[in-house]
Image (spheres, rainbow, N blue to C red):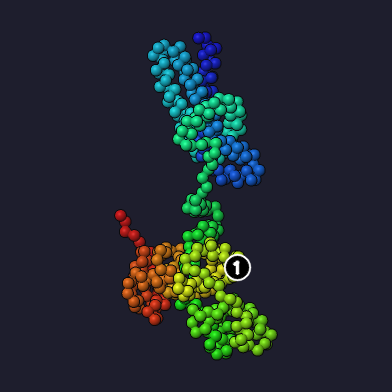
Amino acid sequence: MNNFQIFIFSILLVALILFAAFFSCAETALMAVNRYRLRHMARLKKRYAIRLLQLLKRPDRLLGAILIGNTFANMIASSLATLLAFHFWGEHGALLAALTLTFVVLIFAEIAPKTLAAIYPEKVARWVAYPVQIILKILYPVVWFANAITNNLLKLLRIHVAHHTAEPLSREELRSIVYDTSGKISRQYQNMLLGILDLSKLTVDDVMIPRSEISGIDIEQPLESIIAFINKHHQDWIPVYRENINQVMGVLYTHEMLRLLLSKTTITKELLEHFLQQPYFVPEGTSLNIQLGYFQQSHEKVAFIVDEYGEIQGLLTLNDILEEIVGDFTSSLASGKRIQLQPDGSYLVDGAMTVREFNRTTDWELPLGGPRTINGLIIEHLEALPHVGTTVLIAGYPIEIIHVKDNRVKLARVFPLLAQPAP
């Protein structure tokens, strides 16, 4: 072997190791690239993204081309290294060449390029896509033959490569993706996305106004009291019932009443009943996302939640569902009255406030699996009637009962989470 041949073989050996590094880099990058980001970039008409998606449609052919090229480069490099070692060191050189080449390939053609591709998969995939596409076309007959054998073997295991499609993301996986967007989108938008994903997990019972908190008009009251009630309560709708809420007659939308008052029309109870909208009933346990669809179809804005016996358990509005998604946009003033931050970091809370609303307002984590209101949560943990001055520890949060009325907690003070002892 003359000097020219040694020089050519040495150049080829280095080139083959670089080829092997390229194929290793391409394999890791193309398998690790974010498919969803690629689809987004493809919709923006980015050529590299379109090319990558075309390659990834048939991963068997893509991997076939890469692995054939990688195997070919490593085998030829091994043969050249053996020839060169035999020329310089004789028979003992073959073993030395194998050990040396194994170390070189492992470091420079496997670990280093694959680590780089794993850290920057999209950037690497962007640059290797076109060369891999050309190599796939050149090696297509060999790739087709190898894939035909491989795919038939996989069919014995009932795996059909040509009909395989990527699994869609589950709701929990989408939640994880939204959580990972911290710092990329605002906390408000992140909470909105999570709120949408949570709609199917919640029922109308979780966000409804409890029966005890429903304020409305008893049609049996004097007309003066009814008009005073309407003038006092600044809300878009008012339930109207006879004697108790279970005998609900309908919903009065206050803009109709205001129009009558401004026109100086004589108000009578018969006129009020004429303007009542028929009550809309929903069974308890209805999923929030289903109820949102019902609101859209029926164009209703207020629904009464009833149990299996037809007893009214609460009241739900369209705004209550929307606030689960976007937060308190219509009742911020009311929420401010129901919860007040204290100088020591604790909160004075109305017992009728829901646990979900409290957690959303404070970013704390009182348990959501049980009672819906602060009052119910306290009584459940006490397992007794509440008394002023009693303190209960719930999920690490000390809660002191401040005011009790009719055996219900009307006002409580929730303190910050206690520091957990070191393990």
Q: Quadrant of residue 414?
A: bottom left
Side of 382 relative to 235 (left or right): left
- Look at the picture and state if 86 lies above or below 131: above
Judged from the image, the secondary structure of the residue bearing numbered disc 1 is: helix
Asked whether 288 or 403 is in front, the reply is 288
Q: Identify the residue at image location x=64%, y=79%.
A: 256
Q: Considering only vertical position in the picture, is 313 above or below 3? A: below
Q: Residue furthest top?
A: 2
Q: Would you call the spot at circle 1 few (<14 residues within 10 Å), some (14-19), or many (20 or more)? A: few
Q: Residue at x 61, y 40 (%)?
A: 49
Position of residue 31 relative to residue 410, above or below, is above
Tally the marks.
1
Residue placed furthest toward the right: 263
Per the image, the residue denoted by label 1 is 298
* Extreme residue in the left direction: 423
The residue lying at 59 percent from left, 44 percent from top is 39
Residue 46 at x, y percent in the picture: 64, 42
Q: Is residue 25 visible?
A: no
Q: Nearer the viewer, residue 12 or 163?
A: 163
Q: Position of residue 178 (x, y in %)?
A: 51, 53
Callout 1 amino acid: Ser
Quarter of the image for the C terminus: give it. bottom left
x then y, percent, for residue 404: 38, 79
Residue 56 at x, y percent in the picture? 56, 37
Q: What residue appears at the point 39 percent right and 77 percent down from the top-left corner?
A: 408
Determine if residue 411 is in view: yes
